[in-house]
Amino acid sequence: MKMLKGNMVVAQSGGPTAVINASLAGVIQEARKHTQIAGIYGLVHGIEGALKEELIDLSLESPQTVELLIQTPGSALGSCRHKLSDDDYDRILSLFKVHDVRYFVYIGGNDSMDTCHRISALAGSYGYEIQVMGVPKTVDNDLAYTDHTPGYGSAARFVALATRDTGRDLESMTTFDDVSILETMGRNAGWLTASAVLGKVEEDEAPHLVYVPEVPFDENQFLDDVTNIHGRLGRVFVVVCEGVRDVDGNYVGQQVLGSSGRDAFGHALPTLTAGVASYLSGIVGQRLGLRSRFLRPVLIGRGFTACVAESDRREALLVGRQAVAQLVKGEGGFMITLQRVSDRPYESVTGLAPLAEVANAEKLLPREYINEAGNNINHGFFDYALPLVDGPFPPLARLKGARVGKQIAHH
Amino acid sequence: MKMLKGNMVVAQSGGPTAVINASLAGVIQEARKHTQIAGIYGLVHGIEGALKEELIDLSLESPQTVELLIQTPGSALGSCRHKLSDDDYDRILSLFKVHDVRYFVYIGGNDSMDTCHRISALAGSYGYEIQVMGVPKTVDNDLAYTDHTPGYGSAARFVALATRDTGRDLESMTTFDDVSILETMGRNAGWLTASAVLGKVEEDEAPHLVYVPEVPFDENQFLDDVTNIHGRLGRVFVVVCEGVRDVDGNYVGQQVLGSSGRDAFGHALPTLTAGVASYLSGIVGQRLGLRSRFLRPVLIGRGFTACVAESDRREALLVGRQAVAQLVKGEGGFMITLQRVSDRPYESVTGLAPLAEVANAEKLLPREYINEAGNNINHGFFDYALPLVDGPFPPLARLKGARVGKQIAHH
């Protein structure tokens, strides 16, 4: 391995997380320690910044600002979702050459790892030496070759606590809704949705039903499930992934999205923003006659500082640091991974996975974490996910509730 | 004042909060110190528990359980929304008499204070001696005669952090939505909605527009406001209260709620659950041609343990304790209030307000906290509300972002 000398470029891609900037801080802090890295540049709005030659000089940021990045949500460099053409890769490599960029760190998910891989592969054919390292980031937790992905733990902590606490809230009202439906993010993978169970201690606590994209969604079965739980408890707390699909692969609730309903002014009803929870809430009302409400926090849980898991923040910082530490050692063409050493106490170390392999793999929720009926999550998932959300959570009270004997005749 | 001896009943009413059980814990802990209080009973599901004679014996709960109540969201006794008839009051007083109840503590909002007041007033005409004390609780913060209401600070902390952090998230995406609309709770009062500004440091950070029920909502003005901000920043973060009404007093978006649109199966589209943010998101898309998304966490922020303000929890516990301390001193017919002693450092003491006065008053957001255009919140509100949400919040990083000079000719 040859030691390169030159500038480093770092960029962020895809949906932000609560800890994506901790990875950026790790990259900057580590890069400052190594003399073979001359300038540290950030791409503005991810790879779009490379196409437009919009770079910022991160060497000029104060140590205090870099330290504050560790607790700052969103993507401080700006992010993008950009599908690259062959021409784009030419332009990116030209840019890197002109600015003497010898190290490229890309913080992102599957698509970003694919971009990393191609840049790495194309550089050779250009006769240009550059070392590339991917830093994993996604709340969806669907990256392969790593135990989990930074960003997931904090987003999962939000889903777990929101479900537990809102479940307690709804449990205490008799005159409220019968059915509550919380929609969670995750287009293909049910990791985030599954995390809804992580605050559950007793059988009848929320969530009562959990639907992930890994199991085809059957509307009639769903209505039966709701009916059963409602008959037993008088209330139902459902968690459903935005990405659930029917047996034919169609997203559930898309018919509402394509609706041509019109309001009193003759304007088409909102279409873009309906989603699966709104749709299911509607059919629960219409076909079961139950009062239903949907909760759709959407992006709120993705970058919410109030729900950051400390282990998640620590690992996000660590993978950023490791990316640079490996690059200056001469490694390139990899994504930094997290390997679990033990569950209790939770411990992890970093590893390396070849970009080529990571880019083409998607890690879905294993079937053994889902119950047989496909409407809830098995206990095995707790062992995997609890350490990632800094669980178990501080306990809540449950009153014993010994009834005082009645002394009045009631009719 | 005569010192009564007998049992105490405590109940919770209306929508739960993140700290309503801290007040319950305060009541129980204080009651256990006083020998003239024999039994401590809880009404199951608020005043409904009195009508059905469903009481639980709180003397049997362990000190550990009572301590855990301080960190438990939801209403541990169960809650209700029940409009009482004259007959109901008869039944309640009969129940209290049969169970030798001499102290009644009701934790709730305006309606509960009205119930307290009537029970107190009617007891006299029954020739039955009972002392009644109200404990303030509502995320809406609309109780009069108190600086603020326990429950508000924690719910406001959720709104403030969700707005700030999701604002950062959206700010970092160029290829995302143009307009995001966060709906907040609060039927008549804009206190919770206003709290969205509390994490804002720089002018162009979220929220850009804030609409409260205290100002009549003008749809065309709203669209102009959105157009202006979008023209300047390319993105708009709107916070709107579920209770905004037009100049005629009609809730905005009710036309959608009454829609007879039908989905592909011919079922009526969801009606109960649409709300103002969904409606506004629709007209932004249709009339301005901008991509829009609504965020509707609904109840999540009301009882979310991840957002509890420590000052709120402490005060919730304190007003519970004070209610009993005052009762055993012979005081009755009041609601415990919070009086602010100083802003920095924040300090408060408790006081007493006559139930008769509290019950018939509603404290709305003062006009001077709202800007002239009626689409944002003035700085004066920060002094009032920041201490209640445990603000100011830990700072976030903002990169200086010095651009690296371009070296490529761009077309």
Image (cartoon, coloured by chain):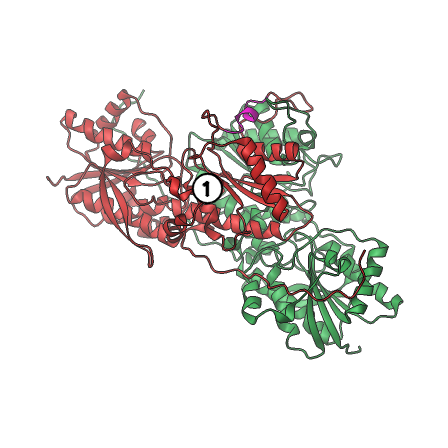
Chain colours: A red, B green
Tell me where residue A262 sits by quadrant: top right
Position of the N terminus of chain A by quadrant: top left
Image location (x, y in percent) of residue A247 = 46, 27
Q: Count residues near mark 1 (Cα–Cα under 10 Å), then give few for <14, some for 14-19, many for 20+.
A: many
Q: Residue B96, position in %: x, y?
A: 78, 67
Please check the rendered image and state whether residue B103 is part of the magenta-colored stretch, yes or no. Answer: no
Q: Amino acid at mark 1?
A: Thr
Residue B269 appears at what percent x and percent y? 63, 28
Instruction: Determine whether the residue tagged by mark 1 lies in a helix, strand or loop.
Output: helix
The residue nearer to you, when weighing B46 against B309, is: B46
Label tally = 1
Q: Is residue A301 visible?
A: yes
Q: Residue B155 at what x, y percent from top left? A: 58, 52
> From the viewer's perspective, is residue A35 above or below residue B258?
below
Q: Is residue A253 magenta?
A: yes
In the image, A38 versus A143, the foreground residue is A143
Asked if residue A72 is positioned above or below residue A119 in the image, the reply reads: below
Q: Which residues are magenta?
A: A252-259
Q: Which residue is at a point 67% across and 49% down the rendered structure image?
A: B365
Residue linked to disc 1:
A193
A321 or B367: which is nearer to us?
Answer: A321
